[in-house]
Structures are given as C-alpha cells and as structure tokens.
Image (tube, rainbow, N blue to C red):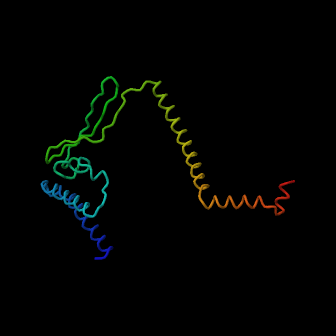
Amino acid sequence: MNRVQSEKFRDVHLNHKYNLIHMLPSTEVPALSGFYLKSFYNGTKRYRLRLPESIVEPDNKFCGNCGAVRIPLFNTDMSITESNIENSGESIRALQYTCLHCKTQAQLAPTRIQKEIPERDEQRVKFKKEEQKKDKVNKKTSARERAKKRKRSTLSNMLSQKNEEKKNKSFSLSLDSIIQND
C-alpha cells in the first residue's frame, strides 16, 4: 500500500469503529460498548492520532465505567446539583450524569453563581470590565510595536540602513541634497 491508500484505510477503519460505538446504544448491548471504545482508542494510539479532549476525557462523552455513549433520556439521566459555599453568598452548580446501564454518576461543568450583587459591587464590576477593554487595546498597540521592531532588526534591513548611511556620508552632490540644505 502506498501512503495515500494507507491513510484512506486508516480513516475508514477509525470512522467505522467510531460509528460502531455510536450505534451500540440502539442494539441495547451495553457490554460491547466498553470493548468497542477500547478498540477505537487502541486504533488511535496505533496511528498516533490526537483526539479532542471531549472524546478522551472518561466522563465527558462516554461513561467512564462501561464506555457507553451518553445519550440523554435514552441511556443517561441528567440532573443539576447545587451546593452553597459558606460565608460567600455563592453557590456551585454542576450537571450530574447517571448512566442507566452501570448506575455510575459523574459531575460535569461546575460553575460558580453569585446570588446577589450589591449596587456598589455591580459598579466595580463594570469599571473592571472597562479597564480590561483598555488594557486589551494597549496590548494590541504594544504587539504592533514589537512586530515593527522585529521587522527592523532583520539582517537585510540592517544592511540596507548601513548602505543608506554610507550614501548620505558620501560627498557627491545631488539635487536632493542641495534642496535639503537650503
């Protein structure tokens, strides 16, 4: 097989395994889910491919215990859990998944929520946001300046500047030099 054929085979092979993983919940054979998922991961290792974090993390797209694809209301129950943080007025919400095949629970996407913000704090938040916008503008200008400095510091630019200095130091008269001196 040449390179193009081997890449095509690899793509077809991994697509087939990935599609099998997603077809298993409809067959209602959860025991095969983990086997096919492991086979898919081994195939990506064999071909040295990097998968996105959403696929690789154990409790994100697939159940970390049995390997089944999470399909809400079909093989996964979802609920929102909320816990309060003492003395801060904040609470943490998390999405909790429960696999209906193996009864494993996993929490995803914890977010902090402030319950009440006094008016003074709201004004501070607005002021901080405005300051952050100004800082971003300043960072852009400094990045532009750095880019210009990098362009000026190349070897060809340095040589051209030296050549211009030599031309300016020479005593040949030109119409431009006469006009500039007047």
Residue 178 or 96: which is nearer the viewer? 178
In the image, what residue occupies the spot 27% across and 68% down? 10
Q: Residue furthest right?
A: 182
* Residue 168 picture location, percent across and down: 76, 59
In the image, what residue occupies the spot 14% across and 48% down? 101
Image quarter of residue 167? bottom right
Image quarter of residue 27? bottom left
* Residue 66 picture location, percent across and down: 16, 50
Residue 132 or 78: which is nearer the viewer? 132
* Residue 144 picture location, percent across and down: 58, 49
Number of numbered tags placed on the structure image: 0
Image quarter of residue 86? top left
In the image, residue 19 above or below residue 77: below
In the image, what residue occupies the spot 33% across and 23% down? 87
Residue 60 or 174: which is nearer the viewer? 174
In the image, residue 78 above or below residue 166: above
Q: Residue furthest bottom?
A: 1
Residue 157 or 171: which is nearer the viewer? 171
Q: Residue furthest top?
A: 87
In the image, residue 172 above or below residue 4: above
In the image, residue 64 above or below residue 12: above
Q: Is residue 14 left or right of residue 146?
A: left
* Residue 63 picture location, percent across and down: 20, 49
Task: Report the quarter where the N terminus lies.
Answer: bottom left
In the image, what residue occupies the spot 18% across and 59% down? 36
Q: Is residue 170 left or right of residue 43?
A: right
